[in-house]
Image (tube, rainbow, N blue to C red):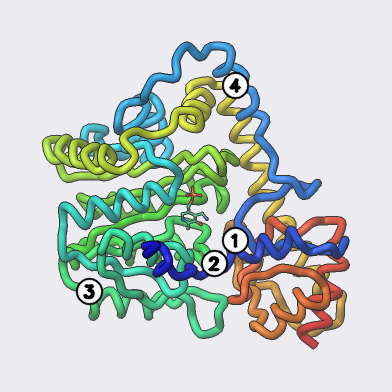
């Protein structure tokens, strides 16, 4: 009998599924505020100018398509370390692994936990990025959630988080944190709150796993590393998962990294060897192109400056869209204050729209928002803000 007849259809990815529906929608007024990619003024997800310039150089100078080392390109790994940690930690304590995107970084971290610290449970914020649980589940790492978003759905429940991490965790457990631009809420701890969280992690011997998918999208490259600094100041060990999908616009090139901080350099060398062993039996070695782009940009002062300017442009524009939305909503007379969006960071926020309103926006007006009410602010556009606010007002009245 055919063996595959037992295979049942897997549920579609909730967010990417919306994307397909959006593509099929023929309404010229349609607007996609669901999927997490940056869009520029013309509604495109652009190739950054610094990336194009780096690619030109790579094409001209490329001599081989030979394999990269298992743990990735050496100069790329050095640049990642500097970007994430500056010179705050002795380089010999940091093992860096180039990975296929931030997802690959999280997956290798999960594999590392599962193989090296079996039994450790990972604590995940409620809510979180929809893929986090599945990634840890795939490596058989048990997980649970800690409180994060307050009942008002707009602010950080710092007491709830501290309480859960204090009373529910066991020493040796891991805690998954979003360094900045929390997905899906846009709600981040303040520097002072990060210090409190870091002190608790250290005191309770909890291992921080920091998802750093939006470095530079909140307040700036260094500013957004406040969580990393606070935590590594007091914790000897930490794992940071970087993604360069958003801040370099390299979504499809799959560029990311895991940085594991150990207490001493001998341990770090052992960690590096275990990370390589995990990669060898998984995908053997990482793709070259995306990491070569990042390394080329960060190796060159002019290209780095160009990148900083382009990143600032994206970050500033997202903030402007936030305030334009808030101001325009005020003029609709809907009487609903959206100013909380101004305190939130990155592309995402919980709009507070309920599933019925989200549904009505899609059915009647072809505005696509995730069922939870999460909106991608970067999917808004200056020209069409009046229209967007008019129809949002229509469904909340
Ligand atoms: N973590 C978070 C919080 C994210 O939002 C994303 C991307 N949506 C990722 C990780 C994964 O990034 P990548 O596309 O580089 O795999």
Q: Horizontally, is 308 left or right of 389 in the view?
A: left
For the residue labelled by badge 2, is the local secondary structure a helix, a strand or a loop?
A: loop
Quadrant in the picture for residue 279: top left
The tag earlier along the polypeptide, 3 or 2, is 2
How many numbered marks are there? 4
Looking at the image, can residue 200 be seen? no
Q: Is residue 390 left or right of residue 140?
A: right
Mark 2–mark 1 CB contact (< 8 Å): yes
Mark toward the start of the polypeptide (3 vs 1) = 1
The mark that comes first in sequence, 4 or 1, is 1
Looking at the picture, how far across and down is residue 123, in whole percent?
31, 69
**How many residues crowd mark 3 within 10 Å: few (<14), some (14–19), many (20+)?**
many
Horizontal relation, residue 215 to residue 357: left or right: left
Under tag 3, what secondary structure?
loop
| Sequence-earlier tag: 2 or 4 | 2
Where residue 97 appears, as percent x and y from the top left, is 32, 38
Q: Which mark is residue 12?
A: 2
Kind of element beneath mark 4: helix
Q: Which of the 4 image quarters holds residue 3? A: bottom left
Dot 1 lies on which element?
Answer: helix
Which mark is drawn over residue 169? 3
Residue found farthest to the left: 266
**Is residue 98 in sight in this rendering?**
yes
Q: Percent x, y for residue 115?
A: 18, 53
Could you give the CA–CA distance between mark 4 and mark 1, rounded to whole angstroms?
A: 36 Å
Residue position marked by numbered label 4 in the rendering? 302
């Amino acid at each position: 009998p055919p063996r595959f007849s037992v295979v049942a259809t897997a549920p579609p990815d909730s967010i990417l599924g919306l994307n397909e529906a959006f593509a099929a929608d023929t309404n010229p007024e349609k607007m996609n505020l669901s999927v997490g990619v940056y869009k520029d003024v013309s509604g495109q997800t652009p190739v950054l100018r610094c990336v194009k310039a780096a690619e030109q150089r790579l094409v001209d100078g490329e001599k081989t398509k030979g394999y990269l080392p298992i743990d990735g390109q050496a100069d790329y790994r050095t640049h990642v370390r500097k970007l994430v940690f500056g010179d705050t930690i002795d380089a010999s304590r940091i093992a860096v692994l180039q990975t296929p995107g931030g997802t690959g970084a999280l997956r290798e971290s999960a594999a590392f936990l599962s193989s090296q610290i079996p039994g450790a449970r990972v604590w995940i914020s409620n809510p979180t990025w929809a893929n986090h649980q599945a990634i840890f589940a795939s490596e058989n790492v048990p997980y649970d959630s800690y409180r994060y978003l307050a009942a008002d759905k707009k602010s950080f429940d710092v007491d709830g988080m501290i309480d859960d991490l204090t009373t529910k965790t066991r020493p040796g457990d891991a805690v998954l944190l979003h360094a900045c631009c929390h997905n899906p809420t846009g709600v981040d701890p303040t520097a002072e709150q990060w210090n409190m969280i870091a002190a608790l992690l250290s005191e309770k011997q909890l291992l921080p796993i920091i998802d750093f998918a939006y470095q530079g999208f909140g307040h700036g490259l260094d500013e957004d590393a406040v969580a990393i600094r606070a935590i590594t100041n007091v914790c000897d060990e930490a794992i940071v998962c970087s993604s360069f999908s958003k801040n370099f616009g390299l979504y499809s090139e799959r560029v990311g990294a895991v940085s594991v901080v150990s207490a001493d350099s001998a341990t770090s060398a052992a960690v590096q060897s275990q990370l390589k062993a995990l990669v060898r039996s998984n995908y053997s070695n990482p793709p070259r192109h995306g990491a070569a782009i990042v390394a080329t940009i960060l190796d060159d002062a002019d290209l780095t400056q160009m990148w900083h300017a382009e990143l600032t442009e994206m970050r500033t524009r997202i903030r402007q869209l936030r305030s334009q939305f808030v101001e325009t909503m005020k003029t609709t007379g809907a009487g609903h204050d959206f100013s909380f969006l101004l305190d939130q960071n990155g592309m995402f926020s919980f709009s507070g729209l309920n599933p019925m309103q989200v549904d009505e926006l899609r059915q009647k007006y072809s505005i696509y928002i995730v069922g939870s009410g999460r909106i991608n602010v970067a999917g808004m556009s200056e020209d069409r803000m009046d229209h967007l606010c008019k129809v949002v007002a229509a469904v909340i009245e």
